[in-house]
């Protein structure tokens, strides 16, 4: 007798003949994602199956797989959602502030604000995301879209600040800012203080230190140090070699 599978059977496939409207399709996709986030938090990532998610969402298993190829793709949907919400949440501070420390701190605290409802869920699946070979890793090819969106926020942080960034550091610094945000995320996952108060303090102090470092980078003698830090991460952090461009290689001309 064959082993049971979580994949849909012939009678559970999505209906081929019916085309859903874009609005209805997006609603169904959002419903499946919301249901998955709740079950991941209640039962844990490993113990939650696509079949259980489909049942709770009130859709067929085939429809669940129509929108998401598996649990890993549901997490990618979560990453994309957080990235999109963050893009919206930072607008106020980026439109108002020109001080670099205020812009960096505002962007980091905006991420903490929107991530608050997902804290316990993040704790549940962190051990999967921490595996450098997992598609859930923020450095994985599967996470590229959310990663690029996040780095673009930091690029805008620098571009709109009154502190001017040397031209040869404009590609490197946004990536380093994103890496510092990943450090904050790691701390936030394990932060048990009320309201994640220590994470907010870390964001503020990290923003102050980073702004000072960027300001000092205007001195040409210190710029090689910034490149060296970037190369250190590129060479030794799991996944970074694939995630970020190698600064030593010439850029392709379009």
Image: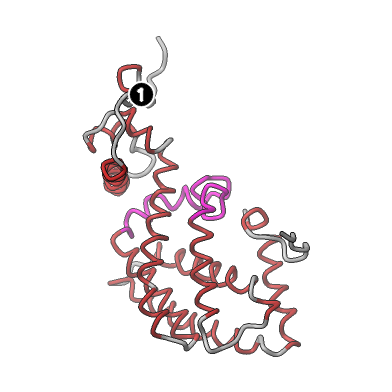
- The image shows residue 167, relative to residue 15, as above or below, that is below
- The image shows residue 70, relative to residue 200, as above or below, that is above
Residue located at (49% from left, 80% from top): 206
Residue located at (33% from left, 53% from top): 121
Quick check: is 52 in the magenta stretch?
no
Location of residue 108 (image quadrant)? bottom left
Q: Nearer the viewer, residue 109 or 48?
A: 109
Task: Give x and y (percent) for residue 23.
Answer: 28, 45
- The image shows residue 130, relative to residue 104, as above or below, that is above
Left/right placement of residue 203 relative to residue 56 reads right
Task: Give x and y (percent) for residue 62.
Answer: 34, 27
Q: Quadrant of the N terminus?
A: top left
Q: Nearer the viewer, residue 122 or 16?
A: 16
Q: Which residue is mark 1?
A: 8
Q: Nearer the viewer, residue 81 or 237?
A: 81
Left/right placement of residue 154 relative to residue 1 reads right
Task: Give x and y (percent) for residue 246.
Answer: 72, 61
Left/right placement of residue 57 relative to residue 248 reads left
Mark count: 1
Secondary structure of residue under mark 1:
loop
Colour scheme in the image?
secondary structure
Residue located at (66% from left, 85% from top): 217
Task: Give x and y (percent) for residue 242.
Answer: 65, 53
* Residue that extends furthest to the top in the rendered view of this protein: 1
Q: Nearer the viewer, residue 198 or 246?
A: 246
CA neighbours of label 1 inside 10 A, class few (<14), some (14 to 19), many (20+)? some
Range of residues picked out in magenta = 118-145
Q: Main secondary structure of the magenta part?
A: helix
Q: Quadrant of the C terminus?
A: bottom right
């Amino acid at each position: 007798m064959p082993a049971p599978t979580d994949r849909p059977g012939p009678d559970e496939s999505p209906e081929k003949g019916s085309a859903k409207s874009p609005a209805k399709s997006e609603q169904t996709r959002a419903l499946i994602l919301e249901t998955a986030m709740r079950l991941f938090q209640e039962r844990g990532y490993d113990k939650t199956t696509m079949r259980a998610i489909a049942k709770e969402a009130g859709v067929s298993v085939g429809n669940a797989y129509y929108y998401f190829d598996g649990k890993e793709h549901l997490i990618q949907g979560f990453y994309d959602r957080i990235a999109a919400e963050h893009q919206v949440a930072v607008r106020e501070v980026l439109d108002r502030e020109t001080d670099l420390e205020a812009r960096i701190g505002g962007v980091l605290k905006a991420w903490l604000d929107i991530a608050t409802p997902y804290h316990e869920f993040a704790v549940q699946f962190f051990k999967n995301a921490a595996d450098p070979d997992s598609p859930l890793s923020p450095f994985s090819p599967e996470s590229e879209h959310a990663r690029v969106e996040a780095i673009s926020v930091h690029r805008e942080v620098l571009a709109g600040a009154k502190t001017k960034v040397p031209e040869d550091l404009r590609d490197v610094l946004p990536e380093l800012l994103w890496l510092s945000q990943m450090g904050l995320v790691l701390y936030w996952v394990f932060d048990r203080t009320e309201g994640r108060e220590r994470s907010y303090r870390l964001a503020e102090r990290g923003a102050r230190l980073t702004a000072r470092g960027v300001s000092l980078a205007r001195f040409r003698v210190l710029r090689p140090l910034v490149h060296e830090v970037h190369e250190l991460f590129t060479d030794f952090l799991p996944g970074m070699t694939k995630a970020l461009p190698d600064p030593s290689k010439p850029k392709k001309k379009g």
